[in-house]
Image (tube, grey):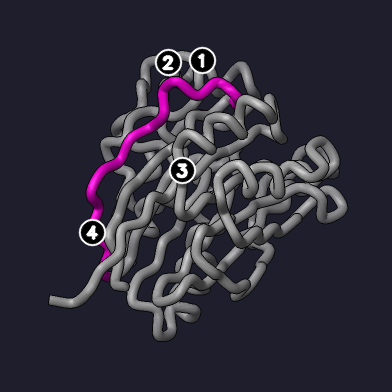
């Protein structure tokens, strides 16, 4: 039998470091091996990533600032040595007035596994689908010799777990397009699933908003020989407007 190793993967949208001390305490308690963060704002939380790394015992810190003068974006922190593979700007993205909401993705390699952290458009399912299609192609090209891959982040993608009866009001209040099921053909989540990706966070629970959540928009997707052991949200976390998603997996050693 081939050797495997256990990894605890955590995805957390930190809301521009909403309550930094509370976020750090939460992440230290969760003890991730791979930590993927979205909405990291370096201007609002200078030094925050290193503080998180120190508190969690994580050795490697990778950050990609895809907007706001390269100060705002996604991060991947790992316990084991890891190396940067690529940073990309995603196609598509909603436009509000004269402002284009630019999204990005960060890729790292950790032994035989590659990890991507991203944050898809929060307004339009059509724009999310465009971004998902580009990511699927990029991930296919980057797979290389990696025997397992993880795609982690805030995909803003709705599925049948959502409390649909409350979503219409929330979307209207925020000026978003009407909510759409992302798991149906043409949706962003469906784009990943039909290309061999598995929702490793299925059944983890709802993640947004943190208080009285109505949807899960935070995901861990897996491709290749990844065995999911457990998936959950940390319902006690209150440092952000999202709950962290925690997925325990086994991957080839």
Quadrant for the C terminus in the image: bottom left
What is the crowding at mark 1: few (fewer than 14 residues within 10 Å), some, or many (at least 20)? few
87 displayed left or right of 229: right
Q: Nearer the viewer, mark 3 or mark 1?
A: 3
Q: CA distance from mark 3 to mark 1?
A: 36 Å
Q: Which residue is mark 1?
A: 169
Q: Nearer the viewer, mark 3 or mark 4?
A: 3
Residue 187 in view, yes or no: no
Is label 2 in contact with label 4 (beta carbons under 8 Å)?
A: no
**The residue positioned farthest toward the left in the image shown:** 1
Q: Which residues are magenta?
A: 225-240
The answer to whether residue 220 is above or below residue 2 is above
Q: Which residue is mark 3?
A: 31
Compare marks 4 and 1 and give the one earlier in the sequence.
Answer: 1
Q: Which residue occupies 51% across, 40% down?
A: 156
* Residue 118 falls in image quadrant: bottom right
The answer to whether residue 208 is above or below residue 126 is above
Q: CA distance from mark 3 to mark 4?
A: 19 Å
Compare marks 3 and 2 and give the one earlier in the sequence.
Answer: 3
Q: Which residue is mark 2?
A: 166
Mark 2, secondary structure of its residue: helix
Residue 66 locus on image (x, y percent): 74, 56
Quadrant for the N terminus in the image: bottom left
């Amino acid at each position: 039998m081939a050797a495997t190793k256990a990894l605890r993967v955590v995805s957390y949208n930190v809301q521009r470091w909403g309550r930094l001390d509370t976020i750090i305490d939460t992440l230290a308690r969760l003890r991730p091996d791979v930590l993927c963060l979205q909405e990291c704002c370096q201007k609002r939380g200078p030094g925050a990533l290193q503080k998180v790394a120190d508190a969690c015992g994580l050795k490697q810190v990778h950050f990609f600032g895809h907007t706001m003068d390269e100060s705002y974006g996604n991060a991947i922190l790992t316990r084991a040595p890891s190396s940067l593979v690529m940073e990309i700007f995603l196609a598509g993205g909603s436009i509000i007035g004269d402002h284009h909401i630019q999204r990005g993705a960060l890729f790292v390699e950790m032994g035989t596994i590659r990890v991507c952290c991203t944050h898809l458009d929060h307004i339009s399912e059509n724009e999310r689908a465009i971004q998902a299609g580009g990511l699927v192609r990029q991930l296919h090209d980057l797979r290389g010799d990696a025997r397992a891959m993880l795609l982690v982040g805030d995909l803003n993608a709705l599925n049948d777990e959502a409390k649909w009866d409350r979503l219409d009001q929330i979307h209207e209040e925020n000026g978003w397009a009407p909510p759409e099921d992302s798991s149906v053909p043409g949706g962003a989540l469906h784009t990943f699933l039909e290309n061999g990706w598995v929702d490793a966070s299925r059944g983890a629970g709802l993640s947004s908003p943190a208080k009285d959540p109505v949807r899960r928009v935070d995901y861990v997707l897996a491709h290749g020989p990844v065995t999911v052991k457990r998936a959950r949200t940390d319902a006690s976390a209150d440092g952000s407007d999202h709950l962290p998603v925690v997925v325990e997996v086994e991957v080839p050693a």
